[in-house]
């Protein structure tokens, strides 16, 4: 069996890859929890000698090492995934491809595998990322911004008087907590909508917007453009990457 592991800044997501074009049910764990290694045990017990574990990580080196050690201990050494200049019909815009996060790279592979596009890929996770891929598979580039949660945390750290929790986003709020919620979410939505307008101007046609990440649903509700939910885009891209590397059905 092939296993796909997406180790993000806050969570580990895992899915089986039984055959090309199909991934299994996605499981997720917060790796910031003190019981993280123990919580993985029921899944680790499913691993068998000969299984292949494809690991894409943007987490810190210590967390990545913990996951790699757990996999090796259960007979499934991690196959680390790296950003490549070109793969599966996608060409990366970065002059130094290694500086493009592997999660963004894999999302591009997944989008291109869906069809010719163009695609605007939005991930609302620990950071907010936006990437543009044209119909030929050329990555045009992207932007990175803080997530709404991190915008609020930064304000609270710099200005303690703005350390309000909770709140509901409104266009015009009548208390500070709601104003912070609306401002941070509105800033994120504004970036995505601006990127979509710029992409349409640049390419001469509107790209399809794929939206993933833990904050995807909340961001989607604030957007005034059509989006397609894509919660497993990185895992799907891992499957495309594995197939590109010559791995078939396991």
Image (cartoon, rainbow, N blue to C red):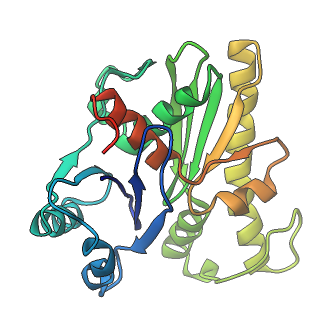
> Which of the 4 quarters of the picture holds residue 101?
top left
Residue at 27% x, 32% y: name it.
98
> Which of the 4 quarters of the picture holds residue 149?
bottom right
> Does 133 sit left or right of 170 as displayed?
left
* Observer-nearest of 231 and 168: 231
Question: Residue 231 in the image: x percent, y percent?
Answer: 59, 54
Question: Residue 143 in the image: x percent, y percent?
Answer: 53, 37
Residue at 60% x, 51% y: name it.
212
> Does 171 sit left or right of 124 as displayed?
right
Question: Residue 82 in the image: x percent, y percent?
Answer: 26, 37
* Observer-nearest of 250 and 220: 250
* Observer-nearest of 237 and 59: 237
> Does 204 sit left or right of 135 as displayed?
right
Measured along the vertical axis of the image, is residue 75 above or below residue 127?
Answer: below
* Observer-nearest of 37 and 202: 37
Measured along the vertical axis of the image, is residue 143 above or below residue 62?
Answer: above
Which of the image's four quarters has the C terminus? top left
Question: Residue 178 in the image: x percent, y percent?
Answer: 78, 76
Residue at 80% x, 50% y: name it.
223
How many marks are shown on the rendered structure? Answer: 0
Measured along the vertical axis of the image, is residue 106 above or below residue 135?
Answer: below
């Amino acid at each position: 069996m092939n296993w796909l592991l997406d180790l993000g800044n806050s969570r580990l997501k895992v899915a089986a890859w039984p055959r090309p074009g199909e991934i299994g049910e996605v499981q997720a764990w917060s790796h910031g929890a003190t019981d993280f290694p123990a919580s993985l045990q029921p899944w680790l017990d499913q691993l068998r000698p000969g299984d292949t574990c494809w690991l894409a990580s943007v987490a810190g080196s210590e967390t990545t090492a913990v996951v790699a050690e757990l996999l090796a201990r259960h007979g499934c050494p991690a196959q680390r995934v790296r950003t490549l200049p070109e793969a599966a019909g996608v060409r990366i815009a970065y002059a130094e491809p290694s500086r493009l996060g592997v999660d963004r790279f894999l999302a591009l592979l997944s989008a291109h595998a869906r069809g010719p596009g163009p695609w605007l890929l939005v991930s609302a996770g620990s950071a907010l990322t936006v990437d543009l891929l044209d119909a030929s598979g050329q990555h045009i580039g992207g932007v990175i911004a803080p997530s709404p949660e991190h915008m609020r945390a930064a304000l609270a750290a710099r200005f303690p008087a703005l350390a309000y929790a909770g709140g509901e986003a409104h266009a015009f709020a009548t208390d500070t907590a709601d104003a912070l919620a609306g401002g941070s979410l509105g800033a994120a939505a504004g970036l995505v909508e601006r990127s979509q307008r710029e992409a349409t101007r640049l390419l001469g046609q509107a790209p399809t917007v794929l939206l993933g990440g833990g904050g995807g649903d909340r961001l989607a509700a604030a957007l005034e453009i059509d989006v397609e939910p894509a919660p497993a885009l990185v895992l799907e891209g891992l499957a495309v990457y594995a197939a590109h590397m010559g791995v078939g059905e396991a």
